[in-house]
Image (tube, helix red, strand yellow):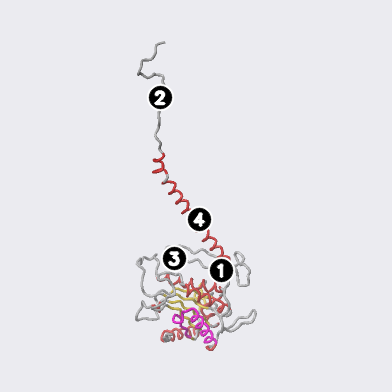
Amino acid sequence: MLEAKAGKPDRHEATVIKRGSRKHHDEGHGGAWKVAFADFCLALLSLFLVLWLMAAREQEHLKEVMREPGGNAVDEGQGHMTETMGGPRGSLIEREPLPHTGDAPAGSRPAEAGAKVHYESPADLKTLSQVLEKLSVDAGLSSNLQTVITAYGLRVMLHDTDKQGMFERGSAAPNERFRNLLRKMGPLFAQMSNQMLIVGHTDSLQYADRGYAAFSNWSLSSDRAMAARANLVVGGMPMSSVLQVVGMADRAPMDAVDATAGVNRRIELLILTTAQAHTVAAMFGMPDNTQPLTDGVDSALPDREALQALRAQIIQTKGSTPDAN
């Protein structure tokens, strides 16, 4: 065998390949994504924690709302139900059971078990107005309430002022003070047998979209009246206490000189006497006194004396201006 020549390496000698370390490269670029991923996981965990706390709080609040003062939970389907109300975008408020809350306010006439109080005479209506005024003072809304005793009952006007409103502007959502006041009125109205009209009023400012199907002051006044009714029911007022809910938009301003004045934005509770409630109900019920015009066609005959009395009351109301508090 021939010897390899001096100075020449053997071809069959193993070739050693040495790879450079990438440790510093990984440290410079490969670790950043781990930090970002850890931050993402921490943020996601925080989000889940916040959502869990909100759900737990909402569940606790729902249990409180669904529980009556006596401690008995309201059975499903047997609680008071809110009315469906639509907003400017046509969204519907979900119907939820509404329990009775609150106690009878101080100063109200106590009713015997199973009996209800009748407010008929001017003296009775004056007593009722004094209790309502006391509630408004306690709620910090003394300047937002006016009461007027009329021939047909007690007119309670809950209106805006230059400094304080009842609702969010352009919305049917009552603010916290007004909502609490309405709910405090609920137990008082639960004790009386009188029925009422709830009337919503707005100022003369119009929405930008004035199409025939657009949201308008008519819709706003109606929604606000319905919101007032719903909060009275939450406070404990029976649903049967309300005879009619009306939205009048800006057609009956209290301040006709300044149609945009805050006093024109109001909710009125017309607490009717028994006779007046029957008269209003008869206007929309089945007519009792009819006279045939031709075969098969009847015409209702109005009660002339009742119509004249009602017309006189309306004229008297328009001619009188309530004193500001």
Which numbered mark, 1 or 3, is in the foreground of this view?
1
Q: Which of 286 and 176 is in front in this view?
A: 176
Quadrant for the N terminus in the image: top left
Q: Which amino acid does label 1 sit on?
A: Leu
Q: Where in the figure is residue 74, as x and y percent of width and height?
A: 61, 67
What residue is at 36 percent from the left and 73 percent from the top? 205
Q: Which residue lies furthest to the bottom in this view?
A: 123
Circle nearer the N terminus (2, 3): 2
Which residue, given by chain and number where applicable, does mark 2 sit on?
A: 15
Question: Identity of the amino acid at label 4?
Answer: Phe
Q: Position of residue 179 (x, y in %)?
A: 49, 73
User: What is the magenta range?
Assistant: 124-148
Which amino acid, by three-letter code, is at mark 3? Gly
Which residue has dot 1 on it? 98
User: Label 2 is placed on what type of residue?
Assistant: Thr
On the image, numbered disc 4 is attached to which residue?
Answer: 48
| Residue 147 belongs to magenta span | yes
Q: Nearer the viewer, residue 204 or 169?
A: 169
